[in-house]
Amino acid sequence: MKKIKGACRCGKFTYELNKPPVYAAYCHCTECRLRNSSPCTSFIMGLVNCLVVAGEHDLYSEASGSDSTLDHHRCSCCGTVLYTRVNKLENIVAIPSATLIDESVFQPVEHLWVQSKLPWLEINDGLPQRSGPPKLPAGLLSK
């Protein structure tokens, strides 16, 4: 498998993910929509110990509606968030699909939090729609 690579808008903060993603989806929660100024967010999840980053970046943390805290790692220059630690999850990072150099790596399996979806957004891609959070394997959840 080739390494999955990504970068911020200005290219000064980059990453490589050395193993395939463990999950990928679209999120329609209000937090993601407001944080990203978009009708939904698309992301992949990977193992944190397989993520290699380079470049100056900073961190901001926030509480999440999914009963966790989120640590967002963003470029110090352009502000693009390259990955987020969902502290409720064990050894997992969430990576926005828009930062992927090869966007074909994004292979979503479902839509999340569709109860919060914008009323004018139609989902017609045939993927499952979950009203709340993903049902992740127990090995990904923190103890």
Image: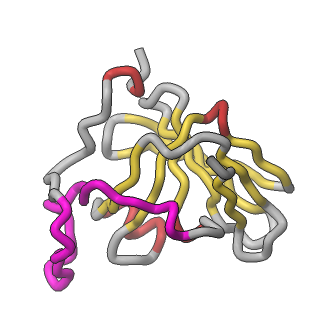
Report which quarter residue 38 is drawn in. Answer: bottom left
Residue sitting at 45 percent across and 76 percent down? 37
Give residue 131's position: percent from left, percent from top: 14, 53
Report which quarter residue 82 is drawn in. Answer: bottom right
Part of the protein shown in magenta? 103-127
Q: Quadrant of the C terminus?
A: top left
Is 56 placed left or right of 37 in the picture? right
Let me know if residue 114 is in the magenta part. yes
Residue sitting at 48 percent across and 39 percent down? 86
Question: Looking at the magenta stretch, what is its main secondary structure?
Answer: loop
Q: Which residue sits furthest bottom?
A: 120
Q: Nearer the viewer, residue 31 or 98?
A: 98
Q: Nearer the viewer, residue 63 or 77?
A: 77
State the count of labels: 0
Q: Nearer the viewer, residue 125 or 59?
A: 125
Is 136 placed left or right of 139 in the picture? left
Report which quarter residue 108 is drawn in. Answer: bottom left
Is 59 placed left or right of 43 in the picture? right
